Image: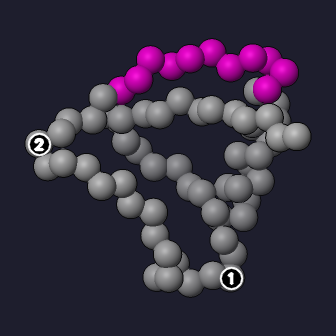
Amino acid sequence: MPGMDPTIFEHHIDTWLDASPVRQKQRPIHTYKALPIKSEIDELRKAEFIYPIAYTSWVYNTVPVNKK
């Protein structure tokens, strides 16, 4: 988040040392959900809350959740 010190918080996924990452099969996203997902990702990238990284051996599928 802009204005927050990144040393305060950091996301980390704990894994076992002998575990190897597995690439999931990419699942299609419905066309009516694709545009809102893209716009939300663009907003988060503009705010520098998220940024692209190059993990070629592990990918997780986007899971959109409808809000009430």
Q: Secondary structure at mark 1?
A: loop
Q: Position of residue 26 (x, y in %)?
A: 51, 19
Residue 18 position (above or below residue 12): above
Q: Residue furthest right?
A: 68
Could you tell whether 51 is left or right of 54 in the image?
right
Q: Would you say residue 26 sits in the magenta stretch?
A: yes
Q: Name the mark on residue 3.
A: 1
Q: Position of residue 65 (x, y in %)?
A: 73, 35
Q: Name the mark on residue 18.
A: 2
Q: Residue furthest left?
A: 18
Residue 67 position (above or below residue 33): below
Count the labels in the image.
Answer: 2
Residue that appears at 47% across and 34% down:
60
Density class for disc 2 (Cα within 10 Å; few <14, some 14-19, many ≥20) is few
Q: Earlier in the sequence, mark 2 or mark 1?
A: 1
Q: Position of residue 52 (x, y in %)?
A: 53, 49
Residue 20 falls in which quadrant of the image?
top left
Q: Position of residue 49 (x, y in %)?
A: 64, 63
| Residue bounds of the magenta highlight | 23-33
